Image (spheres, rainbow, N blue to C red):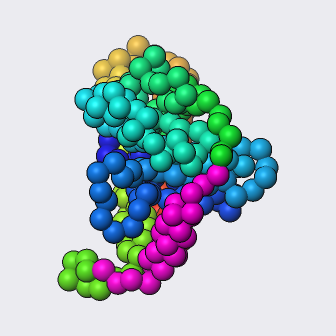
Amino acid sequence: MLAADIIIALKKKHNGHKWRNFTEFRETTGYLGKGANIIDFLAFGVYNSAGADKVVAYEIKQVKSDFRKDVNDFKTKQRIALEISNEFYYICPHGIISMDEVPEIAGLAYVTATKRIKIIKQAQYRELQGIPYYVVKNLLLQAVEQEHLSDIPIKYIGQELTQKDFMELVKKEAAKTNEYRIESEAEKIHEKLVKERDEAAGMLHDIHREAKCTWHYGNSHLTPKEKHEKSVATMKHANSITEAIEEISKKALEILDASKSLTELSKKP
C-alpha cells in the first residue's frame, strides 16, 4: 500500500465542509533546517459540532523499521505535531504496528485493504495551548497554495493540464474500469446461461431421438391407443424443455440489456 493510498483514505475520513486538510505540512517555508518537522497529514476541524472541533495530526508509516526510528525519538520527531494538534495518530497498513508499541499519548489507526480507516487505539485528547504565529503564517501560505493549485498547468503525456483537467482524466479512466468490470461480470453470467441452454437443447435432442427409436423398435407390442398416449407424453416432455430453453435465452438477453444500462450509467459523471 502506497502513502498516497493512505492519504486518500484520510481525505475521505476528514472530508466535507467541516474539515480543512493539509498534506506534508511544513513547519517552516523555504529551507528545512535540522530539527524542523513535517506533518504527513493535518486535519483542522472548523465547526463546533462533535467530532469536528479539534485538530488531528497523522504520521504515516509503511514499514516497522521507519516507525521504530520515529518512536525512539518521539517527542523530538513529532514536536510540532504534538504542539499544534489535539490528537496525534500513527497510521499504517493493517498490522504493521501493534497497539502496545505506540507512545501513551499517541493513537494508532490501520488502513484496510478497502481503504477504510480503523481506529485501533484512541489518541489522548490534549488541550491546545496556542499555535505559534510562524505556524499560523505557514498554514495560511499552504492554504493559498492549495486553493490555487488547480490553476497551475502541469506537463502530462505531452500536454499542459491543470489539476482539474487531470482529475477529469482520472474519472474517465475509473469509468472505463467500472465499465469493463460490469461487462466482464455480465459476460460470465451470459456464458453460464448459454451453457445451460445448450445442455437443455442436448437433452431435447436426446428425447426426440429416444422417442423415435422407441416408436420404431419398442412400440410394436402397443395398441394404437397406447402408442398415441406415449407419443403425447413424449411431446409434452419435449415442449417443457423447449420452454425452459426459451426462458434461459430470455434471461440471457435481459442480463445483456441490464449490463448495457449499467455501462451507460457508469459513463455518466
Question: Can residue 224 be seen at all in this image of the molecule?
Answer: no
| Residue 149 lies in the magenta stretch | yes
Residues rendered magenta in the picture: 130-154
Please name the residue shown 38% across and 50% down the image.
37
In the image, residue 192 above or below residue 45: above
39 to the left or right of 18? left
Quarter of the image with the N terminus in it? top left
Please name the residue shown 34% across and 48% down the image.
35
Residue 233 found in image quarter: top right
Location of residue 74 in the rendering, given as x and y in whole percent from the top left corner: 40, 32
Q: Which is more toward the observer, 86 or 12?
A: 86
Q: Which is more toward the observer, 50 or 188?
A: 50
| Residue 63 lies in the magenta stretch | no
Location of residue 218 in the rendering, given as x and y in whole percent from the top left corner: 35, 17
53 to the left or right of 62? right
Please name the residue shown 29% across and 86% down the image.
160
Location of residue 188 in the rendering, given as x and y in whole percent from the top left corner: 37, 44
> Residue placed farthest to the top in the image?
221
Residue 217 found in image quarter: top left
Please name the residue shown 26% across and 85% down the image.
159
Q: How many marks?
A: 0
73 to the left or right of 268? left
In the image, residue 117 above or below residue 55: above
Location of residue 46 in the rendering, given as x and y in whole percent from the top left corner: 70, 58
Quarter of the image with the C terminus in it? bottom right
User: What secondary structure do most residues of the magenta stretch adopt?
Assistant: helix
In the image, residue 103 above or below residue 247: above
Q: Which is more toward the observer, 1 or 100?
A: 100
Question: Can residue 78 be seen at all in this image of the molecule?
Answer: yes
> Residue placed farthest to the left in the image?
158
In the image, residue 78 above or below residue 252: above
